[in-house]
Amino acid sequence: MKRKNLFVYFGLAGIVIFGITVYSCSKESQHLGENSQIQQEVIDEICTSCESYDFWLPDKTKIEKDEGKDENQIVFTAPEGYVYYGFATDSSLIVWNNKAQGGSVTVTCDCTNGSDNNCSPVGHNGTVNCVIEPDCTTCDRKEKAKDAITKTEYEILQGGFVNPSLGVSFAQPNEELPYAFEALLHYPEIKQKLDTFMLQFYEELDDIPLVTSDDELLIAPEGYKFVVLNVYGRALVTILPTSKSVKSAGGSTYSCPCNGTGNCLTKSKWAPGGSYYFCEKPNSNPCTEACNTMTVEDDESKAIYTYTYYFF
C-alpha cells in the first residue's frame, strides 16, 4: 500500500490513533532524552484530530502478543535494516546509538478508570485496538520504541519504520511506499541528504517555487512538476523543474481525495527546509473517513500516484 502527504520541499501531516480506545493526546513522557527539542508548535499540530490508524509494517515484521501478569502488550519487531524514527512525547527525536537495535515497537493498553485486566490490545497485521471490557470505562493506548541492548525506551508521539540504507533517490512509478512522516524532516542526517539531493536541480534551496492552491487542489507552477522521492523507504513529494530529465512518479497536480463522503482540504505549513503540504478535514462538511490519502496526477499520461499516511 502506498502512503503520502505532500510538501513543496517535503511533506506530511499529523494525526493520532483513536479507535475503540480512548487515546490520550497529552501524554507525559517517562524518558527525557538529550536529543534535539522540537518546536512546541510542531507538537501542538500532531493531534489536531484523533483518527483510527493502522501501523505501517515492513514485510516480514515479527508480531508477538505478550500476556503478562501486570500488562498485556503487542510487540512489532521490524526485519533487519529497519529502525524506528520519530518524535517522543517529551518533544525530542528518537535516536539510537546502534540503529540495528532500534527496530522494535510495543503497544500497551492501560485502563485509566477501572481494572487493567479489562483493557488489552488486540491486533491483526498492522491494526491494533484496545478492547475495553466490563469494569473498565476508559483505556489509554501507548506506543513505545525500545533499544534491545541499552533498554532505553521512548514513548512515541509520531513516527514510523524507515530503512536508512536506502538513502534518498527517485521513487519509481510502480514502487509502493508508505508516505513520510513529519519527524523525518527534523533529523539532521536526513535533511543534509535531502539538501544535497535538491541542490542537484537548484542553485539555492530558496529557488524552490511555491505552488498555487484553491484548498482542494495544489498546482505546480509552469515549468515544474511534483516528483515523488524515496527517502529512507518513505514516499516524499517535492517540486523539480520539468527541464530536468527525471524519470520518476510525478505530475502537475496534488490533491487530498475523501474516501468517504464530504471533503478533505490541502493545507501547508512551514518546516525545516521549506514549506510542506498535507491533508486536513474542514470544519464544514468534513470527510467521514480519515483525510490521509494523497495523490499526484500526471496530466499527460493520466497516471495517478496514490500514497497513504500512517501515524505510526
Image (cartoon, rainbow, N blue to C red):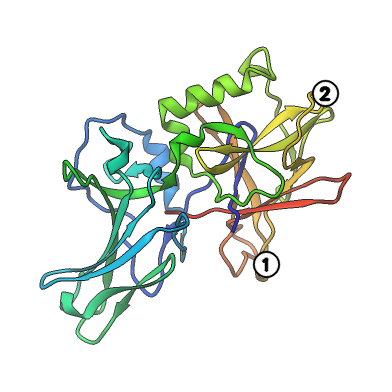
Identified at 48% across, 33% down, the residue is: 185
Tag 1: amino acid? Gly
259 or 167: nearer the viewer: 167
Image quarter hosting the C terminus? bottom left
Tag 2: amino acid? Ser
Left or right: where 170 falls relative to 213: left
Residue 243 numbered tag: 2
Give the farthest residue toward the top.
Answer: 203
Placement of 112 over or under 84, stated as above or below: below
| Mark 1 Cα shell of 10 Å, populated few (<14), some (14-19), many (≥20) | some
CB atoms of marks 1 and 2 within 8 Å: no
Residue 262 numbered tag: 1
Q: Secondary structure at mark 1?
A: loop
Q: Nearer the viewer, mark 1 or mark 2?
A: 2
Left or right: where 289 falls relative to 310: right
10 or 91: nearer the viewer: 10
Q: Secondary structure at mark 2?
A: loop
